[in-house]
Amino acid sequence: MGETIMTPKTALVTGAARGIGLATTRLFVEGGRRVAMIDRDEEALREAAAHLGDAVLPVVCDVSRPEDVTRMASSVRDGLGRVDALVNNAGVADFGPIAETDFARWRRVMETNLDAVFLVSQELLADLCATRGAIVNIASISGLRASTLRVAYGTSKAAVIHLTKQQAVELGEHGIRANCVAPGPVDTKLALAVHSPQIRAAYHDAMPLNRYGTEAEIAEVIVFLCSDRASYVTGQVVAADGGFEATGIGLPALRG
Ligand SMILES: NC(=O)c1ccc[n+]([C@@H]2O[C@H](COP(=O)([O-])OP(=O)(O)OC[C@H]3O[C@@H](n4cnc5c(N)ncnc54)[C@H](O)[C@@H]3O)[C@@H](O)[C@H]2O)c1
């Protein structure tokens, strides 16, 4: 047998200062893990981490920047000693018509939603090999079905779904599992910025559960996929979406 690592299990969560990333951090901490909280919003990160005490290691980092990611990984190694789970959650939403999406806007979405998932996973590859760890990438229902205004956002999330499968297929022999969670709408700062009243009404109509999800409901799925309870699950996309992906047209009319 190889060298046994004696330190407690850890997780690294990007975009951990608020929303789904913060809820995921809290759930990991409740389960006894130490968590590296990564975010580029320094003020929000410090404030969120202050409530979680010694269980967390906040590291300010823009995950779309390769030099930042290298520096961040080294701080995490120094602070936590091991990485058992990586949750690539940091994301930005920018909804707009194709005709109004110039290259700068496209890149702004891609650099965080797609490039950063690649960058952070590459940087932590050896760490995850050492623990036979788990990767969970956060995509979106927008990566599973196309919709208007999401040329950059939806395409970035569809690419994350495929990147997850690439990781699962290639890294399985190292014992690394890679899965994807595709949330439906959740009332976070991100959603509040892009979901107009019309979009909100349309979402309600299209979802069998007829409501937005909560950050905690998404966190449950993420933490499960990172845990040993999911030890034979890899390469999967789990839509935590109130049934949105399962529906066709006409749901409101058929509700009766
Ligand atoms: N809220 C929803 O309805 C919804 C639906 C589907 C998917 N998602 C996905 O869930 C993930 C989390 O979203 P949320 O709703 O919690 O958003 P949020 O805006 O509340 O939180 C995102 C966090 O990521 C951080 N962040 C963004 N870009 C970063 C970067 N380059 N480097 C470091 N930190 C960065 C932000 O500072 C913020 O703290 C995203 O990937 C998002 O696309 C959200």
Image (tube, helix red, strand yellow):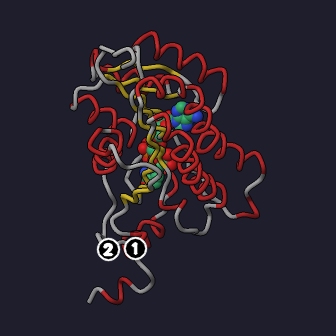
Q: Are marks 2 and 1 in contact (CB under 8 Å)?
A: yes
Q: Quadrant of residue 155?
A: bottom right
- Indicate left or right for 107 with 161 as reference: right
What's the amino acid at mark 2? Pro
Q: Position of residue 174 (x, y in %)?
A: 49, 34
Classify mark 1: helix, strand or loop: helix
Position of 185 relative to 209 (above/below): above
**Residue at x 48% of width, y 44% of height:** 137
Classify mark 2: helix, strand or loop: loop
In whole angstroms, how far apart are the C-alphas of marks 2 and 1?
9 Å
Q: Position of residue 75 (x, y in %)?
A: 49, 13
Q: Nearer the viewer, residue 106 or 57?
A: 57
Mark yes or no: residue 192 visible: no
Position of 214 relative to 199 (above/below): above
Q: Nearer the viewer, residue 236 or 132?
A: 132
User: Where does the C terminus fall, quadrant-wise?
Assistant: bottom left
**Residue at x 36% of width, y 35% of height:** 22
Numbered circle sitting on residue 208: 2
Position of 108 relative to 63 (above/below): below
Is the CB atom of the residue marked by disc 1 within 8 angstroms of ligand 1's nearest atom?
Answer: no
Q: Position of residue 243 (x, y in %)?
A: 35, 69
**Residue at x 61% of width, y 53% of height:** 159
Foreground mark, 2 or 1, reads: 1
Mark yes or no: residue 109 visible: yes
Q: Position of residue 28 (x, y in %)?
A: 29, 32
- The residue carrying mark 1 is 246
Q: Choose the circle earlier in sequence order: 2 or 1.
A: 2
User: Where does the N terminus fall, quadrant-wise?
Assistant: top left
Which residue is most to the front? 1
Q: Residues within 10 Å of mark 2 (few under 14, many from 20)?
A: some
What's the amino acid at mark 1? Ala
